[in-house]
Image (cartoon, coloured by chain):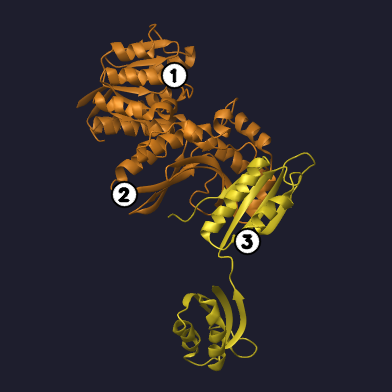
Amino acid sequence: MRVSMDLELKDIPGQLLLALQPISDLKGNLISVVHHHEKHTPRGTIPVQIVFEIDSEKLDNLISRLEDSGVSVVRVGEERFLEHCAVIIIGHIVHTNIQDTIDKIDSTGFAEVVGLTLSMPRVNQPSSAFLKIDATGKKELNEALSLLKNVANKKDLLVIEPIETQFI
Amino acid sequence: MKQVRISIIGFGSVGQGVAEVLMKKQDYLTKMGLDIKVIAISDSKGSFINQNGIDLNSALEQKRQKGTVANVQKTGVEIINEIEHDVVIETTPTNIEDGGVGLENMLASFENGRHVITSNKGPLALKYKYLVDTANLSGCKFKFEATVGGAMPIINLIKGVLAGNDILSIQGILNGTCNYILTRMLEEEASYEQMLAEAQERGIAETDPTYDVEGIDAACKLVILANSVFDMDSTYKDVDSVGITKITPESMLLAYNDGYVTKLIGEVRNGKLSVGPRLVPVGHPLSVGDTLNVASVQTDLAGPVTITGRGAGSIETASAILSDLIAICNNDN
């Protein structure tokens, strides 16, 4: 699983290593570290945000190791959705039941519609929607998008996707 | 001095642009050791022939005053078949139904052993492989940079400067009319119909805009690119294309508020050809506005290379034709 964590370190040398060592010891894979050395919390500690991948059963062990070595763990969150995407939909979105379109994606279990902005200029005119979709991975996101295009096609809606900016 | 005898078949906006550019660049060409003689010009009403070289200035003048250069009743194909010369510049209007006279002209040129430079997309979007094979068999050169993106030298960039690279994908804006309409829709928050009318008023869109706005023109260019770069044998009917007519200004605003502009993008990737509206991040190399064309080529060695330029205009298109002509004269491939 991918985990994001907010930590607070004491403002003395060697603390960052202390925070990262247990992740490495438990064979976690560190993805990012944001170290705000110039910032201090009201408690005089330094906030650090880390993202890493680790076996889920090792997470509790990791947290107690960190706490034992004096690193405070302020927040632990699972990053379930790693891929994000925005699409535009144009047509008679509401009349063709947008809820049903969203449900189709949500019911996959690997992708969710996490944002929707709708613009309806006039009755009988096509409306426009901006949809944000999150998915657990790239393959899943592509699957969710083809599902969306399929539904849109049946409802005579135009789907506009972002260009591929990452080349394979 | 190397003398090269050429004909201009089709004397509309592009053909006249070629004549103007040849006059303008005469000294430049002389310095390169090239003496380019236009021995015949054809338009839809007939032809003008002068074996010693046509005075281009008076030909242009005559075209402007009388609407034709014709002084003999000969068609383009007759000129190609009957008059001895080296290079045919084929600039007749595009026909995407069956290739039209353009196709006839090109095949007749190869049959007579004449090199062809063209800006005419139709024949290439329908019978690319047949034309290239016929040219090769007859030992003729066949150059068509002007068919894709006007002054934007995408084909020669890939074939020449990027030689040695494997091309992984190409994506770009290949139609200036659509780019203009979409750019203006966002700027004015106005409907497609309103901005189409503005484009027509400014001479950027045709009276019947179908060919541009339904993505057919972009699809034809994409086919030519894909065929020449990936050695495919596709026709424009193989392109999954969607036009811009359904795009609303509201959708463009929603996308823009989240950092995207809406563009008509043509793409070749994994052997698949598509043209359709896509969201392009603001500031991305493909997010150019106005009537500009742009293409981004993903290569294995050089990474992404992006080129942008004016996709239409008689002088701009003639620039691509001139560069093809110089390449043929210099015996470059």
User: Horizontally, is A22 left or right of B146 in the view?
Assistant: right
- Amino acid carrying label 2: it is Asn
Which residue lies under the disc numbered 2? B165
Residue type for callout 1: Gly
Rendering colour (chain B)? orange
Earlier in the chain: of badge 1 and badge 2, it is 1
From the top left corner, tell me how far across and down residue B205 is, in percent: 57, 30
Chain of the residue on which disc 1 is drawn: B
Mark 3 sits on what residue?
Answer: A109
Q: Position of residue B322 (x, y in %)?
A: 34, 31
Q: Residue B100 carries which label?
A: 1
Cβ atoms at labels 1 and 2 below 8 Å apart? no
The amino acid on which the numbered mark 3 sits, given as a three-letter code, is Gly
Q: Quadrant of the C terminus of chain B?
A: top left
What element does badge 2 sit on? loop
Colour of the chain lettered A: yellow
Q: Are discs 1 and 2 located on one and the same chain?
A: yes
Query: What is the quadrant of residue B7 in the picture?
Result: top left
